[in-house]
Image (cartoon, rainbow, N blue to C red):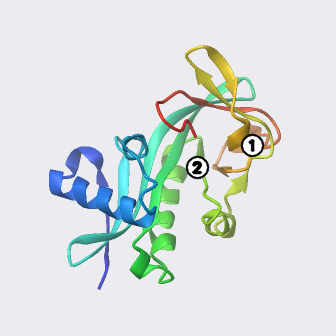
Amino acid sequence: MPQTRTVATADLTTAERSAIRELLDLAFLGNFDDHDFEHALGGLHVLVLERGEPIAHAAVVQRRFLHADRSWRGGYVEGVAVHPGRRGQGHAATVMAEAERIVDQGYDLGALSASHAGRGLYLQRGWLPWQGPTCVLAPGGLTRTEEDDDSTFVRVVAGGAELRLTGTLACDWRDGDVW
């Protein structure tokens, strides 16, 4: 019977990190690079384990967002994946429910970048598509990220009434995909 575990990156063994990376590589059909994996580290990992091996994963990492003339502490959801042979059994919902609890209890807002295939899951769970322009606070200043406008989703948490979905949302800089 599958078990759910939430663990900080710092508490993962080398073997567990490797197993998570293998799952992500498999689930994303080899389209998950070193930057993508780095983005999923440093926060909390939600795992569904079967016989000690991960079959589903989501991570929540802290990021900063600029919106409505303030800085927001965001819980950014990364690396949501289910083993291809275990899809359709509710494992994505399991890891997302715990990721959402973490976001709701610890952050000003939740955010994620959805693949085309993942959009339905997030919409069904109440995540909202961002309707305004997206940007990144890059080394050269505020830079528009038009290619991310349609894939950016947010989760409004208590006190998030100031969040205007049609306004500009800027994320902090990082190597690789910024959203």
What number of labels is visible? 2
Q: Residue at x 47, y 83 (%)?
A: 89
Marks 2 and 1 sit apart, C-alpha to C-alpha, by 19 Å
Task: Tell me which amino acid carries mark 2.
Answer: Leu
Residue 161 is marked as 1
Task: Tell me which amino acid carries mark 1.
Answer: Ala
Task: Say few, some or many: other residues with alpha carbon within 10 Å of mark 1 (under 14 / 14 to 19 / 20 or more).
Answer: few
**Of helix, strand and loop, which one carries label 1?**
helix
Q: Quadrant of residue 68?
A: top right
Residue 112 is marked as 2
Q: Position of residue 150 (x, y in %)?
A: 73, 49
Q: Residue at x 21, y 58 (%)?
A: 16
Tell which of 133 and 154 is nearer to you: 133
Q: Position of residue 161 (x, y in %)?
A: 75, 43
Residue 164 drawn above or below residue 105: above
- Please give left or right for residue 72 compared with residue 60 in the image: right
Q: Position of residue 67 (x, y in %)?
A: 71, 30
Q: Position of residue 123 (x, y in %)?
A: 69, 65
**Of helix, strand and loop, which one carries label 2?**
strand
Task: Say few, some or many: other residues with alpha carbon within 10 Å of mark 2 (under 14 / 14 to 19 / 20 or more).
Answer: many
Q: Are marks 2 and 1 in contact (CB under 8 Å)?
A: no
- Please give left or right for residue 16 compared with residue 148 in the image: left
